[in-house]
Image (spheres, helix red, strand yellow):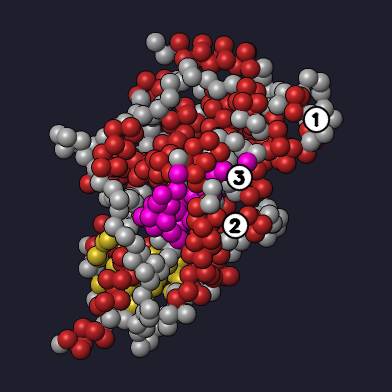
Amino acid sequence: MERNLRDTATILWLRQDLRLADQAALIAAAEQGPVIPLYVLDDETPDQWRIGGAQRWWLHHSLAALDRALRAKGSRLILRRGRAAEVVAQVAAEAHAASVHALRHYEPWWLEAERELAATLELVLHDGNQLAPPDAVRTGSGGFFKIYTPFWRALSAMMPPAEPLPAPERIPAPEHWPKSDALDDWGLLPVRPNWASKFDEFWAPGETGAQDALDSFADKVGRYHEARNLPSEPGSSQLSPYLHFGEIPPAQVWHRLDQAGAGLDTFRSELGWRDFTTGVIARSPDYSAQHGRDTFDRFPWRTGKAAQADLRAWQQGRTGYPIVDAGMRQLWSIGWMHNRVRMIAASFLVKHLLIDWREGARWFWDTLVDADYGNNSVNWQWVAGTGVDSSQFVRIMAPLVQSEKFGAADYIRRWVPELAHLPDAHIHDPPEPVAGYPEKLIGHREARERALAAARSLR
């Protein structure tokens, strides 16, 4: 009986956990015997939240890197397409697999798929994509936190996380492999046109790329508390897409950056924010569509042709506000935007243009390589003032002031070449029209007054 059990294959169901190191599901599966690593491209279960265009570019390269890493350990990656619960069950039946191991995910579509799969197969779930499981971080009365600051205090008291485990030396292979799709046949990469042509200059998807990015950030995390707000400086970690795809676990990041200086606490609180947003969507799965504050269900968002034209101008980086336009063009060029500029650009859409935050969230979902359901939903509601834990709507960012305050001149020069010739004194708010650059969609004072009037209408 022991020998037969060891000969039975186990399915390793991979999702946003595309790594071999500190992969609890892989380690547990390998201890049972032969392992069949399986990734299912599921565009049906998530429906409107199937992965966006920029994420698809990343996914292609991440899966290719993972397959190479698996083959180096005597294994390989099986690719299938369809409804995840059905496809995993089908592959398990083909391989006569006794069980499925996977890391826990908290997006509503993954919870649905897990419930469906567990009804037909032995599904063994493991933790590993958060610093701590969402259900483990509780208030003194046993409830869940709605505000981040007390959540972070409670999570910090549970730290450090367990030391990360190394990847297995070898991964036992089954006697017969199930059929696999060819990655190139999925058409994840853009072709006509190839709008991701610059992505390769900035990103190296996969576990090795994640380690390189972490090593690079370790040298500068000491100044993170200051540099993270300066768009013209390389102060951001740029780890977000690697964390989103699970190519590196937050526990590994935590331990690698130990004793890193003053910026470490600030950065670790950002890791904690990921855990917080995961908890929010685990308990409020419709947070991407429903206001955290019911009052905003009556908010007079602008609609119609003029609003749609303004939305397109914002998406294209043609608002007439240099810092906003630089951010939106950076987003389109490399699938990522500086964190300070994300707040400025999001605030501009919601408060200067009075366009529903959900329009911005959908655009970010399609254009960010790090588009994460929890972060995307909670961050947009935080900026819009509509969330349970959020900035007040009446706190309206002044883009021109923010641009100068945080030294964004060189950042603007890089991403808005029409303005590159302007001196620092003028580049944040050109005093005269510049050939090829649009006029402001709306003046700051006028926009502020309009936004405050809209907010008063809720009373």
Query: Residue at 47% across / 29% down in the picture?
Result: 383
Say what secondary structure mark 2 lies in: loop
Query: Residue 421, image x and y in percent?
Result: 82, 34
Q: Quadrant of residue 40?
A: bottom left
Query: Residue 393, image x and y in percent?
Result: 46, 20
Q: Which mark is residue 234?
A: 3
Residue 55 visible? The answer is: no
Tag nearer the camera, 3 or 2: 3
Say what secondary structure mark 1 lies in: loop
Say what secondary structure mark 3 lies in: loop
From the image, tell me which residue sits under label 2: 203
Amino acid type at image mark 1: Leu
Amino acid type at image mark 3: Pro
Mark 1 vs mark 2: which is more N-terminal?
2
Which image quarter is the N terminus in? bottom left
Residue 18 visible? The answer is: yes
240 magenta-colored:
yes
Q: Are marks 3 and 1 in contact (CB under 8 Å)?
A: no
From the image, tell me which residue sits under label 1: 422
Tag nearer the camera, 3 or 1: 3
Q: Does residue 96 sit above or below 262 in this rendering?
A: below
Q: Give the range drawn in magenta.
A: 233-261
Tell me: 448 left or right of 411: left
Task: Give the CA separation, mark 3 to mark 2.
Answer: 14 Å
